[in-house]
Image (spheres, rainbow, N blue to C red):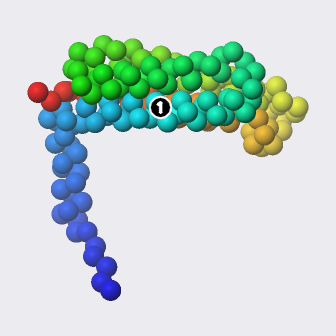
Amino acid sequence: MQIRRRSSSAARWDIDRVVGDVRTGRFERSLSALTAAGALVTAAEIYFEHDSASFGNKMMWAPVALGPVGAAAGVAGFFSRRMAKTALPIASAAIVANGLQGTYLHARGIAQKPGGWRNARYNMEMGPPLLAPLLVTMVGGMGMLAAVLRRER
């Protein structure tokens, strides 16, 4: 059995293709669609995690509600240049703001556990996941990036 290795020229061609997609505007549509998919997946994950915490704080509903909004804006941005430049950045900015707010709220939740930050290792494992809200922030960031990229004609 022979293992085929990719040559460096093939790897360079893949990079050149991605750069070309960014230059021609094809990447903007792909990133809009990826934002839509990412928003749905993260919203579902957030729903299950917050449901296990019984939605103890009303703010836990915000990222769940923003997921379908981001997905709709991403799909609209995929099909329409106008939506990619209006609805997608607005929805994405709201998702980013909510993700940053969630990071603060999760840090506050860890601090409120017995021992607070002095018992950080245990409280980070047993309390709210500190870095999880940054995942949804990245999804919003992808949508904002898609909005500023050039669109193919």
Q: With respect to residue 124, does 81 lie above or below? A: above
Name the residue carrying label 1.
Answer: 40
Q: Position of residue 126 (x, y in %)?
A: 78, 40
Direction from residue 53 to residue 69 in the image, left or right: left
Q: Position of residue 30 (x, y in %)?
A: 28, 36
Q: Position of residue 105 (x, y in %)?
A: 68, 22
Residue beneath the point at 35% across and 26% down: 74
Direction from residue 63 to residue 148 in the image, left or right: left
Residue beneath the point at 58% across and 36% down: 45
Instruction: Kindly indicate the quadrant of the structure image that contains residue 146.
Output: top left
Instruction: Kindly indicate the quadrant of the structure image that contains residue 52.
Output: top right
Instruction: For residue 31, say whether it is visible.
Output: yes
Residue 71 or 24: which is nearer the viewer? 71
Instruction: For residue 147, say whether it is visible.
Output: no
Instruction: Kindly indicate the quadrant of the structure image that contains residue 11.
Output: bottom left
Q: With respect to residue 43, does 59 lie above or below? A: above
**Furthest-left residue in this view:** 153
Q: With respect to residue 104, does 5 lie above or below? A: below
Q: Position of residue 139 (x, y in %)?
A: 45, 31
**Furthest-right residue in this view:** 114
Within 10 Å of disc 1 (Cα), the crowding (few <14, some 14-19, many 20+) is many
Q: Quadrant of the C terminus?
A: top left
Direction from residue 95 to residue 133 in the image, left or right: right
Residue beneath the point at 23% across and 21% down: 80
Q: Secondary structure at mark 1?
A: helix
Direction from residue 64 to residue 142 in the image, left or right: left
Residue beneath the point at 19% across and 35% down: 26
